[in-house]
Amino acid sequence: MRQQLETRTHTAFYLQKILVTSGVVASFVCLAFLITWARFPTTKRLFVFTGNEDRQWTNAGNWQPSYPGNEIAKGMQVMVYGPVEFENFDLTVSGELDIEMGGNLKSTSKAMIIAEGARVENRGAIEVAHISNNGTLVNQVSASLSVDTFLSSIASLTTNQPAAKINTAHVWVNNGIMRNYSQIYIGQTFINGAVYEGSAGASVWVDGKLNN
């Protein structure tokens, strides 16, 4: 039976970013790269997924200025403007990952692991098997996030902005701060062990067990 988490603040004891097809791409990539640098005058090492060759994260030909590797290390900022897929490894974010509008980060079987102090901002779509959030995850306005299981630790902040959607097929365990300004759907179980803050009109719908 579907249950709805009440819109309120619940506190428990704390234990715890082209479009890509061959042809037009080159000029668009250069333009996006320059715009990106202008937007982020920073000392961070910036990497842009262009998708010049295909959708594979591990293909160095898809990246400017070079391939960042399978982990976004501290001091790195990765921006994704189109569809990108990873399948043979868990993607660890220790720096910053931005999925921009039109971007889509996808893995049918692997996880995205957000380290403590790291940040992920989604303005497009994220579809992964599992998310472990130990840092900051922001599902921006009108973005979508789909995951099988979601685990957030004591050090984490997860924000679902207005008109954004999060779909969790199975289980979400929240041990951090969860701020919801829109709709969250959970297929089986939601366990809230820490802080849930919901704005007026925001909802968490749980088809199975709600432990709040």
Image (cartoon, rainbow, N blue to C red):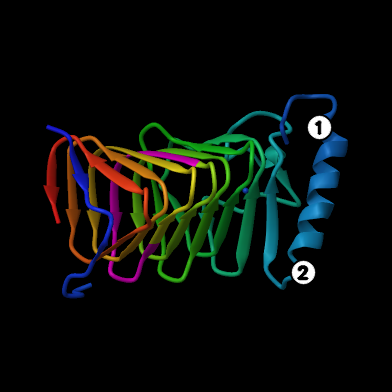
Looking at marks 2 and 1 on the same chain, the residue that comes earlier in the sequence is marked by: 1
In percent of the image, x 36 and y 64: which residue is there? 134
- Pick the residue in front: 195 or 16: 195
Residue 123 x %, y %: 58, 46
Q: Give the range drawn in magenta.
A: 144-157
- In the shown orientation, is residue 73 left or right of residue 128? right
- In the shown orientation, is residue 46 left or right of residue 125? right
Quadrant of the image containing the C terminus = bottom left
Amino acid carrying mark 1 in the image? Val
- In the shown orientation, is residue 155 left or right of residue 29? left
The residue wearing badge 1 is 25
- Pick the residue in front: 124 or 74: 124
Residue located farthest toward the top when viewing the structure as drawn: 22
The residue wearing badge 2 is 41
Tag 2 secondary structure: loop
In percent of the image, x 59 and y 52: which residue is there? 98
Tag 1 secondary structure: helix
* Placement of 12 over or under 2, stated as above or below: below
In percent of the image, x 22 and y 52: which residue is there? 6
* Placement of 17 over or under 103, stated as above or below: below
Residue 86 x %, y %: 49, 37
